[in-house]
Amino acid sequence: MQLTIRDALPSDKEIILDFCKSTFSWGDYIHHVWDDWLDEGNFFVLTENRRPVAICHAFIIKNAKLIWIEGIRVDPNYRQKGYAKKLVTKAEAIAKKNDCTLSSMLIESKNFESLRLAVKLHYTRNEKWDYYFLVPRKICSATIRAKSAKEIARYLADSKFYIKSWRWLPLDAKTISSLIKEKKIIISKGQNRIDSLGIITESDHFEKTMMLTLVYATKTGIKKILPYIQNLTYEKKFERIQILTTKKL
């Protein structure tokens, strides 16, 4: 048996998408990101006797010295052979070559096989996030954009990441400043105090998709910030809103 890990090729697409199509109960997203991952590089395939049977993509976040491992998929007919472990090891080798000191990945809470693999590879759970979705709607709503890092500092004190295209990106001082300038940090106020705060990003990989990292919200604030997002996406002619948060709504 001949095993090889190599860069993904455009010609691999059909066979790989075929074994990815039933990854989750709702399908998979690999067909949405395929071309982008090819362009970004560090998209590799494990072959058995020259047949593509597993894939993985690694995205390097240079300013944080972090590698984000995503899209690990193994053909159901070739599982239980340690192929996912080989792919993660390959990604970690790339991380070392690029002076990365951290390696992270996102695993769905009921994906028990992947969770067990992560433990075997000495990964530890950092945070638990919940996912919600909304549809755009025309609604009369109002909120405001954060004007300075000082204004929102205490609300971001415990926040390590924000989400863009389903990648958890470090939320450092430089990034916060940049997000404020880009008008990506939105807040609502009640009685002259912030009662909700979120970070909005437009997905790079999923068309007409707005992502909201909900950092802070009171019950009153939720009723302000979510209608605002629905109206904003409606005006932009987007089709979906994806909300990620560590807060209980």
Image (cartoon, rainbow, N blue to C red):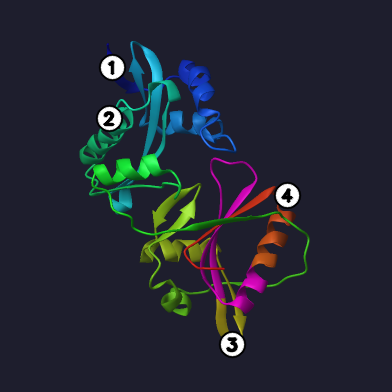
Question: Which badge, 3 or 4, is on the more N-terminal residue?
Answer: 3
- In the depicted view, which residue is nearer to us: 88 or 143? 88
**Badges 2 and 1: C-beta atoms under 8 Å apart?**
yes
- Does 151 sit above or below residue 110? below
Helix, strand or loop at disc 4? loop
Question: Which badge, 1 or 4, is on the more N-terminal residue?
Answer: 1
Residue that badge 3 annotates = 192
Segment colored magenta: 196-225
Type of amino acid under label 4: Lys
Residue that badge 4 annotates = 237
**Badges 4 and 2: C-beta atoms under 8 Å apart?**
no
Q: Say which quarter of the image contains residue 32.
A: top right
Q: Position of residue 98 (x, y in %)?
A: 24, 40
Type of amino acid under label 2: Lys
Residue that badge 2 annotates = 86
- Does 93 sit above or below residue 158? above
| The stretch drawn in magenta includes residue 12 | no
Measure how far apart labels 4 and 2 are at the Cα level: 42 Å
- In the depicted view, which residue is nearer to us: 203 or 173? 203
